[in-house]
Amino acid sequence: MKFPPGFKFGAGTSAYQIEGAWNASDKGISIWDNALHNDPNLVSDGTTGDVACNSYHLWKEDIHIAHELGLHFYRFSISWTRILPTGFPNKISKDGINYYNKLIDGLLRKGIEPVITLQHFDLPLSIQNLGGWTNPLIADWFADYAGVVFSNYADRVKTWITINEPHMVCDLVYNFAILVPIVTEPWLGPFLCNKNVLMAHAKAWRIYDENYKQKYHGKVSIANNPIWLEAKTEDDEDLAELAREFGVGRFSDPIYSEEGGWPPAIEKLMIDYSKKQGFPYSRLPLFTEEEKKLIKGTYDYYSLIYYTSRLVRPAHEGEEPGPWFINGSKELNVILETDPRWPITDSSYILINPEGIRRQITWITRRYKNVSILITENGLGTKSAELHDTARIRFIQDHLQQILLAIKEDGANVVGYTVWSLMDNFEWIFGQTLRFGLYHIDFTDPLRKRTPRASAHYYKSIIKHHSLDVPHPSQVTRELRHSNAGSSKFSLCTLIGLITLGKLVSNSL
Ligand code: NOJ
């Protein structure tokens, strides 16, 4: 149950989801600011990130709770338009730079390592107006932005993530249009975006590598978020592997494989399929040799985000696969299904399969030569705001158990784990209705009071003992319920138990 020495525990957030202060000082407009001001119906409860957790003003509170938990690192993102109000490097915001300086220094003073994501969904509107991730020039615009950020913070920040969840940014956006920018363009959208994201990442990685690596010894990666794809039956194994290459492989092989470039089977499949559809070129844009070389090897670790899994099977005759990556793929003629044994959650596409994280880790380990892996997100979203969040505790415990198995049984080099999220925040199209926090946020309180949940207590204890072998708050709750069941004192005893547990939680934090 012990984690390897040096294994690090953290928690994560992102700028738009927590900062608020959308127009403070000279901050520019992001695509989320713009979309939600123009169409509040995009979000289920009509909320926006205008104030969110108000972390722009309450950043000291965030450091305080991160410290209470005993986090080794805190993953947060930088708002591109807070640093570069126009999206471009013609103007650098002093206040923007200063805000993250205060946060970084404050964390370091408490012994917490800052882990920074450069781009977490909140693209500058100016760049979206020029086509966003489908315009190849974005690679240079992103590199310019990355250069400014590195030049200000690389002396203190050693772990970097260039782009968050390219799978969402490209495949989910252009196939489903349920994230901003609300653009459906499944023909070329996902694939142009795929290539441009990789080029942008590679250029930023090279800027760090050439200018800062030798001096500061930091690490840079891109945060991939594959859904683990399990073959439905033994006969579907080859198809499942092809689907993995189409999913995680398209975003990883060009960076991590020895040969570079798209997974060969996928490149061929897309050339043939595009031809059949009447395209005179592949919908998956091919790399030149130079581009392949530019992207290949641009990693220092693998940043892995894991939430859920799907089963893969071939589409039956007459069955139309839905768009990749939640329902299936027309290109592969596959259907993605859920397994009835995986518990459903309040987050519509997330079903719980902790074994999936182990399988995904070992897949990456085998394919990319035992690369070191940092789990940069994993967590449970609930509609309930309750403080005694036993389901979240269970989720974290079960996933950490599988990570330990991946390390100890499969020889994977997993170096750390990040709970999503440090606190409840603005959960994109679900607004404030879906809560992922170790800390509860009172969104009705102007001070956005942060209150630890039972899961915060549990996580703190794991960090402290560097082990999963720790007292389990949910167990205490369950035992209390059990031992008092049937007795007339049941509710009172349970209540006392819960109050004691509550005190334990708040005292120890
Ligand atoms: C992944 C995203 O990076 C994050 O922004 C989001 O809140 C969580 N998943 C939960 O959906």
Image (spheres, rainbow, N blue to C red):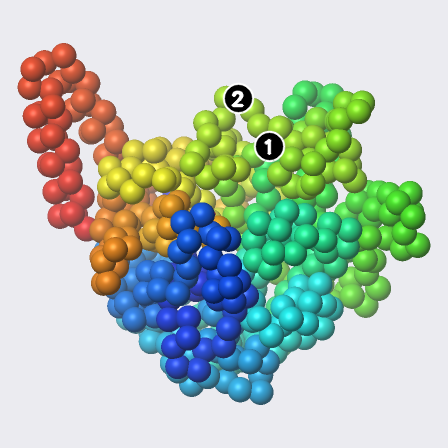
Vertical comparison of 387 with 146: above or below: above
Q: Position of residue 141 (x, y in %)?
A: 64, 75
Q: Measuring 34% from the left and 70% from the top, which residue is drawn there?
A: 56
Q: Which residue is mark 1?
A: 310
- For badge 1, the amino acid type reads Arg
Q: Is residue 330 left or right of residue 155?
A: right
Determine which quarter of the picture holds residue 337: top right
Instruction: Decide: few, some or many residues near mark 2? Use Cα within 10 Å; few <14, some 14-19, many ≥20.
Output: few
The quarter of the image holding the N terminus is top left
Q: Position of residue 127 (x, y in %)?
A: 62, 72
Task: State which tag comes first along the sequence, 2 or 1.
Answer: 1
Q: Is residue 178 left or right of residue 114?
A: right
Vertical comparison of 482 with 112: above or below: above
| Disc 2 to disc 1: CB gap under 8 Å | no
Q: Measuring 38% from the left and 77% from the top, which residue is drawn there?
A: 24
Question: Is residue 212 visible in the rendered structure shown here?
Answer: no
Secondary structure under badge 2? Answer: loop
Q: Measuring 65% from the left and 56% from the top, which residue is drawn there?
A: 183
Q: Position of residue 92 (x, y in %)?
A: 50, 85
Q: Is residue 439 left or right of residue 250?
A: left
Disc sitting over residue 201 in the figure: none
Q: Nearer the viewer, residue 189 or 303?
A: 189
Q: Which residue is mark 2?
A: 340
Q: Nearer the viewer, residue 404 or 53?
A: 53
- For badge 2, the amino acid type reads Pro
Q: Measuring 79% from the left and 40% from the top, which residue is drawn there?
A: 331
Secondary structure under badge 1? Answer: strand
